[in-house]
Image (cartoon, rainbow, N blue to C red):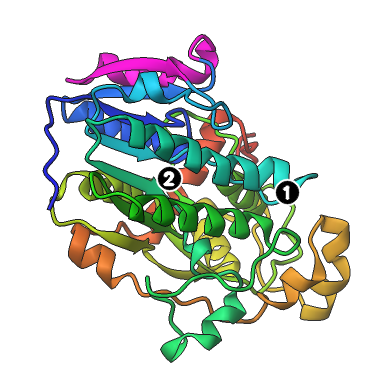
């Protein structure tokens, strides 16, 4: 059982990120002091939204310069902290060099942060943002789990540096975190494993894979249809609440699948179509399997990834997160429409309803 002193500062790595921004807002709204570790605190475009949030909150925000691949760069930001939220890790599917662009920042970055934790005597708990991708590599993997449903007991066994490298990066990074945590007994590790994160960002636009995926549902890219992919989704605001509770509930421990429900690209598109109308050319159906396989290389996807996901149910048990962290999920309809409306308002998607 770990009790965190709320008068002490709390570190959030990658604080300008999509998920981290909502975690930071939650902490500030609770009147806490946040040490925001970012790559460049002097980049006003990237930190201005956090400054505005802090000014309207009861909390205090302090920026620190840190880099995932720079040894010891988190030491200064961690000083005096009892609680560390490590969220910084890239979320991109299309990369030129998976080792450099995904695995190194995730694996070496996690090691770097946790080595700083080992050097910082004040730290009592680390909350790591992992992913359900560290549990499920491809949807077909669920067929090998008891009852066809993934739980926190399972690990991704199918991803490699050449197949689903993002999922591989999250898997090796989380395994490394548990390894480092197990070598000491001063601080404990609590892990959050979210599915696809949706919902509005703290600022109008984010360079996040989540936004790219949802944008393509309404910008005409998917007008002919979408692949028959099954996915889990969770609202970013509920995910921030899960992180907060994982940090402060004394009894929190282990891994937590954070996912509101299983969905599909088509069902998300249908929700958006019902809310925003047909002017955005939302998908009306799924593409034939053979067509998706043939077109995959042209879209930058490998046929192996398509064949191991298309048509297979994706199922994960979210019971632990609900019971242990007290999470109450927003309806997916609310999450996806709030997100899409923000993209319209910000100009990321042209509002074709305007005459």
> Of marks 2 and 1, which one's residue comes earlier in the chain?
1
Where residue 267 appears, as percent x and y from the top left, is: 53, 68
Q: Is residue 196 visible?
A: no
Say if the magenta span includes residue 271: no
* Spot occupied by residue 333 in the image (x, y as percentages of width and height): 41, 58
Query: In the rendered view, does 162 fall on the left or right side of 142?
Result: right
Residue 89 left/right relative to 228: left
47 in the magenta segment = yes
Q: Nearer the viewer, residue 183 or 178?
A: 183
Residue 180 tag number: none
Q: Which residue is mark 2?
A: 338
Q: Mark 1 — residue?
A: 98
| Residue that appears at 55% across and 38% down | 343
Q: CA distance from mark 2 to mark 1?
A: 32 Å
Q: How many marks?
A: 2
Q: Relative to 6, say whether 182 is above or below.
A: below
Q: Tell me which residue sits at (88%, 71%) in the image.
A: 294
């Amino acid at each position: 059982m770990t009790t965190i002193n709320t008068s002490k500062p709390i570190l959030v790595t990658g604080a300008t990120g999509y998920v981290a921004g909502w975690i930071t807002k939650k902490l500030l709204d609770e009147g806490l002091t946040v040490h925001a570790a970012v790559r460049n605190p002097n980049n006003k475009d990237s930190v201005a939204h956090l400054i505005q949030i802090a000014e309207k909150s009861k909390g205090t925000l302090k920026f620190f310069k840190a880099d995932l691949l720079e040894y010891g760069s988190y030491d200064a930001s961690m000083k005096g902290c009892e609680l560390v939220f490590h969220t910084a890790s890239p979320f991109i599917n299309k990369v030129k060099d998976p080792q450099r662009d995904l695995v190194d920042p995730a694996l070496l970055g996690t090691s770097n942060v946790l080595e700083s934790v080992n050097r910082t005597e004040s730290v009592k708990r680390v909350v790591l943002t992992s992913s359900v991708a560290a549990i499920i590599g491809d949807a077909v993997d669920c067929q090998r789990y008891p009852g066809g449903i993934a739980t926190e007991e399972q690990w991704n066994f199918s991803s490699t540096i050449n197949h689903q490298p993002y999922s591989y990066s999250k898997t090796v990074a989380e395994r490394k975190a548990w390894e480092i945590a197990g070598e000491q007994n001063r601080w404990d590790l609590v892990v959050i494993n979210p599915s696809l994160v949706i919902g509005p960002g703290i600022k109008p636009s984010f360079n996040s894979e989540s936004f790219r995926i949802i944008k393509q549902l309404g910008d005409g890219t998917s007008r002919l249809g979408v692949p028959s992919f099954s996915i889990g989704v969770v609202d970013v605001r509920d995910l921030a609440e899960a992180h907060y509770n994982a940090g402060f509930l004394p009894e929190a421990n282990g891994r937590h699948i954070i996912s509101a429900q299983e969905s599909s690209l088509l069902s998300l598109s249908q929700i958006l179509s019902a809310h925003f109308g047909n002017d955005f050319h939302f998908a009306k159906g799924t593409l034939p399997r053979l067509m998706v396989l043939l077109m995959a290389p042209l879209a930058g996807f490998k046929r192996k990834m398509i064949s191991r996901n298309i048509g297979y149910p994706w199922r994960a048990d979210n019971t632990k997160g609900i019971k242990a962290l007290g999470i109450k999920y927003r309806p997916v309809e609310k999450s996806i429409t709030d997100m899409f409306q923000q993209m319209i308002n910000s100009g990321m998607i042209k509002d074709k309803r305007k005459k």
